[in-house]
Amino acid sequence: MAPDNRTAICPGTFDPVTYGHLDVIARASKMFDAVIVGVVDVPWRKGNSLFSTEERVSFLENATRELGNATVEPFSNLLVEFARERGALAIVKGLRAISDFEYELEMNQLNRMQAPDVESVYLMASAKYSFLSSSGVKELATFGGDLGELVPDEVARALQERLAR
């Protein structure tokens, strides 16, 4: 499919989705006509996921329902191939810290080698979410921390059911 400069992919494992993820998705939805939230089906970098692909897709569908131009799809191939299949010209990701930048710089270079026609666009994390990570949320949930300002209620309940000690 030919690239369409109005379509972007926001990829991730989203295990679980946080308000930081949703902030980036919402901001991308204002920049592009269509945003496809790509849920990595088989994450290899971070090991096994806490939630199934179907659960993560459902959480994201519910959380992005009010964005009229966002859809959610799982994928299990190369990100740039997924982008090409969907006709997306851009991959949009959020950056929180220098460590994110280092990893994303490497991924950007590899992606550009594979698909020079697919651009990477990076949005700086909003200050209120610059510390927020899925792994941090899971740790808080394990020890009964308050998740109210970090993840949607549905996700907080699911985390508490799975992880509460």
Image: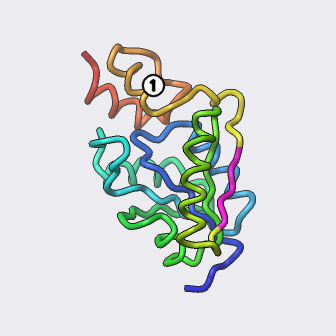
Please tell me which residue is depicted at 41% across the width and 39% down the height of the picture: 16
Q: Position of residue 3 (x, y in %)?
A: 63, 80
Q: Label 1: few (<14), some or many (≥20) within 10 Å?
A: few
Question: Height in image: 162 above or below 145?
Answer: below
At 38% from the left and 21% from the top, the residue drawn is 139
Question: Which image quarter: residue 145?
Answer: top left
Which image quarter: residue 30? bottom right
The location of residue 37, given as percent across then percent down, is 52, 58
| Residues rendered magenta in the picture | 119-123
Q: Residue furthest right?
A: 31
- Within the magenta stretch, is there residue 94? no
15 lies above or below 88: above
Can I make out residue 69 in this image? no
Residue 122 lies in the magenta-colored region: yes
Q: Secondary structure at mark 1?
A: helix
Figure quadrant of the N terminus: bottom right
Residue at point 64% right, 46% down? 24
Q: Position of residue 97 (x, y in %)?
A: 64, 32
Q: Along the line of sight, which residue is nearer the eye, 96 or 31?
A: 96
Q: Quadrant of the C terminus?
A: top left
Residue type (three-letter) at the residue carrying disc 1: Gly
Q: Quadrant of residue 51?
A: top left
Pick the front one: 66 or 156: 156
Point 71% across, 65% down: residue? 32
User: In this rendering, would 130 be left or right of 153?
Assistant: right
Position of 120 relative to 85 (above/below): above
- At which x and y percent is residue 106? 56, 50
Question: Predominant secondary structure in magenta?
Answer: strand
Tell me, what colour scheme is on the image? rainbow
Q: Is residue 93 left or right of residue 148?
A: right
The residue under label 1 is 136
